[in-house]
C-alpha cells in the first residue's frame, strides 16, 4: 500500500534482526523480554498479535486495520503527502533491495577471521544470521 502511494518508508522485519524487536519494545514502552533458564527470550506482553505496526516520524500511527480504514476513506494519501517521493522505486546496487547483506568481515559465516590459541571467535560485526544492514540504502531512509 505504501509503495502504491509512492511513500518513502522503512520496513523492519523483527524476525530478520533481533535489534528491531528490542527497538519496538522501547518505542512502545513495553518491558524488555524475559529470559528463562535455557537462555530463551520470550515476551509476556506480546506485540506479535499487533503486527504490522506503522510509525510515522518515529511516533506510533496505527496497525494494519487503521491503515486500511484510512486508505478506504482517502485520508491516507493526505496524511502521507509530506512523505511522498517522485521516484520511490530505486533498488540498491549492493543489497538489491533486501536492505541486508552478508557480513564483509566473516562473509556470512559468523566466525571472526581472528584466532587466539586455536580459538575462533564469533564475528562482532554481524548479527546471529551472519548479515549486516546495508549502509547504502538504510542511511537514506
Image (spheres, rainbow, N blue to C red):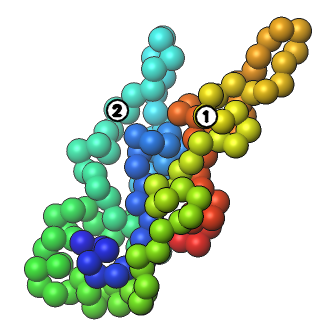
> Going by the image, does 15 lie left or right of 120?
left
Determine the residue positioned at 33% across, 70% down: 61
Q: Which mark is residue 44?
A: 2
- Write down the quadrant of residue 82 in the picture: bottom left
Q: Is residue 35 above or below residue 95?
A: above
Residue under pointer 1? 108
Query: Do we see residue 124 in this rendering?
Result: yes
Q: Tag 2: Cα neighbours inside 10 Å, few (<14), some, or many (≥20)?
A: few
- Whether tag 2 and tag 1 are in contact, CB under 8 A, the answer is no
Q: Distance from label 2 to label 1 (Cα)?
A: 32 Å
Determine the residue positioned at 31% across, 86% down: 79
Q: How many marks?
A: 2
Q: Is residue 77 above or below residue 38?
A: below
Q: Secondary structure at mark 2?
A: loop
Query: Do we see residue 30 in this rendering?
Result: no
- Which residue occupies the extreme right position in the image? 117
First of labels 2, 1 by sequence position: 2
| Quadrant placement of the N terminus | bottom left
Q: Percent position (x, y) of residue 102?
A: 59, 42
Q: Is residue 125 above or below residue 138?
A: above
Amino acid at each position: 500500500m505504501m509503495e502504491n502511494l509512492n511513500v518513502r518508508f522503512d520496513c523492519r522485519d523483527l524476525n530478520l534482526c533481533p535489534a528491531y524487536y528490542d527497538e519496538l519494545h522501547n518505542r512502545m514502552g513495553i518491558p524488555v523480554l524475559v529470559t528463562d533458564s535455557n537462555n530463551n527470550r520470550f515476551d509476556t506482553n506480546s506485540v506479535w498479535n499487533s503486527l504490522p505496526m506503522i510509525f510515522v516520524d518515529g511516533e506510533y500511527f496505527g496497525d494494519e486495520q487503521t491503515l486500511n480504514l484510512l486508505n478506504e476513506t482517502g485520508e491516507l494519501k493526505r496524511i502521507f503527502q509530506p512523505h511522498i517521493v517522485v521516484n520511490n522505486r530505486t533498488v540498491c546496487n549492493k543489497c538489491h533491495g533486501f536492505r541486508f547483506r552478508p557480513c564483509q568481515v566473516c562473509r556470512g559465516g559468523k566466525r571472526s577471521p581472528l584466532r587466539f590459541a586455536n580459538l575462533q571467535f564469533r564475528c562482532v560485526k554481524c548479527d546471529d544470521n551472519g548479515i549486516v544492514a546495508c549502509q547504502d540504502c538504510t542511511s537514506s531512509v
